[in-house]
Image (tube, coloured by chain):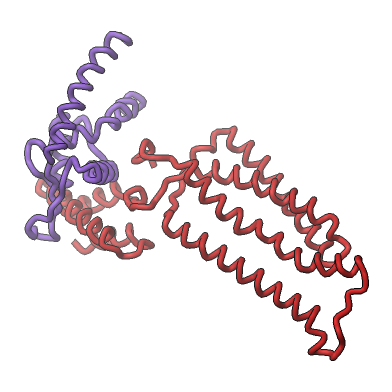
Chain colours: A purple, B red
Amino acid sequence: MQENSISRDFIRGNIDTIILRVLIEGDNYGYEIIKAISKNSHGKYELKEPSLYTSLKRLESQQLIESYWGDESQGGRRKYYKVTAAGIEAYKHHLAAWKTAKVLIDQLIE
Amino acid sequence: MNRLKDHVDRLFSGYEESNQIRELKEEILSNLEAKVADLTSRGMEYHQAVSIAEEQFDHIDGLIDDNKQVYTNKVRLELLQLTLLYTLIAWILTIPLRIVGMGILLNYVLLIVAFVSGIGFLFLNMKMKRGHWNKISVWNMKSALQYNRWVWILWGLFITVVTLVTTAARFGSNIWYFRPVSITGPYQWTVLAIEYALPFISVIIPLLFSTSIKLVQKYEAGESYEGKK
């Protein structure tokens, strides 16, 4: 439990990048983003819905993603998200920064 | 589907319907529906799937613009401290006003408020040392600022009315009793001035209200807290 909550804290700081990665693979809507993240983590990480919406809102306000309403599904309309050019840039930047940090942190704490 | 819609409506009860809210509601509902459809397609009972969807998504406070999550007890503690400070200052200021009946009363009331907020401060301070500092509550800044404006407007009205009443009572005697107003000396002049000044002590109330809004901004819990609730 303790270990689990610690790794959640590590992940929390990178949720935006994780979502950007999913959206780079294709436009998507909320629940499918959660599912994709769960799949990418082989079921080890489940993104919570409030965190998802907060993160999407933040990314949208930074113009890293855009949203549009899709066709009617069985229930209501679906809101899809699409990554922007700035979003792709930001993703590459975060990825490079993460790789540098990873090596550094490994050296420092291992 | 209806049970989910009711759940989402319940989550949003208390929020005024705006474009932002309507879109967020629709988005959340369609995602919850997708989730339930996904769970049932994997063999789960419909009702159980709905219950899971409801349980895992039980608050939206952090998602609304203008909403701030705030460390409640930190705000309370500083507010109590300021109440203590303000009432003590007011208490000292009103000591000379005790020559008027109302002044004595007000002076005592202020002393009591100062005493109570002092005790409250010590009590809360002790409680927070025992780890109660991270309690969170949600403030909607837009309505808080609106309330704040109303408090100041009401206070302004109060002061205006009280001042007019005092004036009518003191200087209206010409009209009521056909007797001219007479201020016979410095003592009477002081009594009159005190009567005008006394109501202004109540500025403490709107002042504390404004301060609490500043404190809310100061002790915002921020995004690191999301999902920990």
Question: Residue B203, how many percent across, how many down?
Answer: 65, 59
| Quarter of image, res A64 | top left
Asked whether B21 or B29 is in front, the reply is B21
Relative to A1, say whether A26 is above or below: below
What residue is shown at x 58% (from left), y 33% (from top)?
A: B130
What residue is shown at x 28% (from left), y 59% (from top)?
A: B21
Question: Residue B72, how many percent across, how many down?
Answer: 51, 45
Asked whether B203 or B16 is in front, the reply is B203
Describe residue B72's horizontal placement relative to residue B191 as left or right.
Answer: left
Question: Residue A102, how many percent across, how many down?
Answer: 24, 17
Asked whether A58 or B134 is in front, the reply is A58
Describe residue B92's horizontal placement relative to residue B136 as left or right.
Answer: right
Which image quarter holds the N terminus of chain B? bottom left
Question: Residue A63, how many percent across, how many down?
Answer: 20, 43
| Quarter of image, res B119 | top right
Relative to B216, say whether B192 is above or below: below
